[in-house]
Image (tube, grey):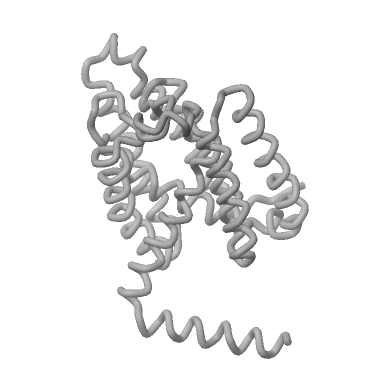
Amino acid sequence: MIKLRYAHIYLPVFVVLWLGLFLDSSALAKQFVYNQWFTNVLVLLSYVWIFCHVSKVIQQLMLFGLLVGLGGELLFSIILGMYTYRLGNIPLYVPFGHAIIYACVYYIAKEPVALQYRETIYRILYCLMIIYATLWLFVGDDLFGFCCMLVTLWLLHRHPESRFFFLLMFFMIIYLELLGTHYHCWQWPTIWFNELIWMTSGNPPSGIGVFYFAFDVGCLYLYKRWNIQRWHRFRAIQKIRRSMLS
């Protein structure tokens, strides 16, 4: 029997994303004017639950994730107009959602069964990613998503030490985006930035998970700046371990 050590952290996230986005759906908005607040409360409670069950390092990363997530939303949604939320705002639940997704994927990647079959899982997901983006390219005219997938392939090649985490994140974002666009919580324009007619886009773009590379870099940057000495010790230990293995 497979024992899941961290299921209490990441399994609720899948349910919260589905239920929360359903509560913020355009269909439910016809019945409840303030339905988005149901999602805000649900995601906030989920954030608190996960925050109380993760390590201190992930707690800090979750806090930094709020800042990075909010900054990213302001840039990409409000300033650049890459996508638009149902009410034209940045819902309160969104930055908290970014943080809990980050913690969720981190602990999926840490599961003993995931580590045991890491390479097999990686190869399967790698092939599925290419197939998924290719299908969206031909079926949904999603050139933008396909290009994002190609960038993801390059990043996975450049950063092999993080490739398992990022590939899991890629599919987590697929799950999130398909739910969010299905319930009309947000929408992507048919062309990139609603301006570049040659760069067609799906709703959602298939490879949009590539932007979570930047999210991770932002969180780690803030963590390193906040914990300079601890980070230097960690890197020194890593160098010693590599020298012993070589």
Judged from this view, the residue extending furthest toward the front is 198
Number of numbered callouts drawn? 0
Please name the residue shown 46% across and 86% down the image. 233
Horizontal side of residue 175 vs 126, given as left or right: left
Toward the viewer: 108 or 154?
154
Is 65 drawn above or below residue 22 in the view shown? below
Please name the residue shown 35% across and 64% down the image. 60
Is 61 drawn above or below residue 185 in the view shown? below
Residue 9 seen from this side = no
Q: Position of residue 150 (x, y in %)?
A: 60, 47
Identify the image quadrant of residue 35: top left
Toward the viewer: 58 or 144?
144
Is 91 drawn above or below residue 182 in the view shown? below
Which quadrant of the figure contains the C terminus? bottom right
Q: Position of residue 146 (x, y in %)?
A: 58, 38
Residue 76 seen from this side = yes
Horizontal side of residue 234 vs 20, given as left or right: right
Horizontal side of residue 238 vs 213, given as left or right: right
Q: Position of residue 239 (x, y in %)?
A: 58, 86
